[in-house]
Amino acid sequence: MTHEALANQKELIEALIASLRETDEYLTEQTQVIEPSVSLGRLTRMEAIGEKAVQEHVQALNQKRIIRLEHALDRIEAGNYGLCPVCNEEISAERLSSVPEAVMCVACMEKRAKS
C-alpha cells in the first residue's frame, strides 16, 4: 500500500472514530436509568425499557468498533496495516475501504468461517 493510500486510510479511520465517539456520547445520554418516579404509563415504560436495551446494545457495538479502528491505527503506525497475517498477502483496497478495521483478507476469512 502506498504512503498516500495509507494516509487516506488513516484520515478515514480517524473520521470514523470521531463520528462513533459522538454517537457514543448521544447513546450514553439515551441509556440513562429510567426513574420510577417518571410519569409514564405501564406500556410506555416497558417500551422505554426495551428501547434502552437496544440502545445499550448499539452502544456496545460502537465501542467495540472504536477499539478495532484504534487497533487499525496502531497497525498503520507499526507498518503492517493492510497485510493479512494468515497468508501475508495484501488485503484488497476495496475491502479496506468498506471495512477499514479488517485484519484478514476475504479468502482467509472465508476459510476461517468454514472451519
Image (cartoon, rainbow, N blue to C red):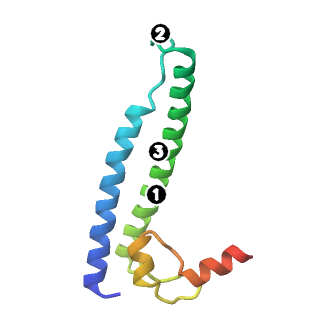
User: CA separation, marks 1 and 3?
Assistant: 10 Å
- In what quadrant of the picture does the N terminus appear? bottom left
Q: Earlier in the sequence, mark 3 or mark 2?
A: 2
Identify the element where label 3 is drawn.
helix
Asked if disc 2 and disc 1 are in contact, CB closer than 8 Å, the reply is: no
Residue type at mark 3 is Gln
Residue type at mark 2 is Ser
Q: Earlier in the sequence, mark 2 or mark 1?
A: 2
Crowd around label 1: few <14 · some 14–19 · many ≥20 (10 Å): some
User: CA separation, marks 3 and 2?
Assistant: 26 Å
Asked if disc 1 and disc 3 are in contact, CB closer than 8 Å, the reply is: no
Where residue 104 appears, as percent x and y from the top left, is: 54, 78
Q: Which residue appears at 30% of the width and 71% of the height? A: 10
Q: Residue furthest right?
A: 115
- Which of the two residues, 100 or 3, is positioned nearer the viewer here? 100
User: CA separation, marks 2 and 1?
Assistant: 35 Å
Instruction: Report the residue marked by disc 3.
Output: 59
Describe residue 115's horizontal placement relative to residue 4 as left or right. Answer: right
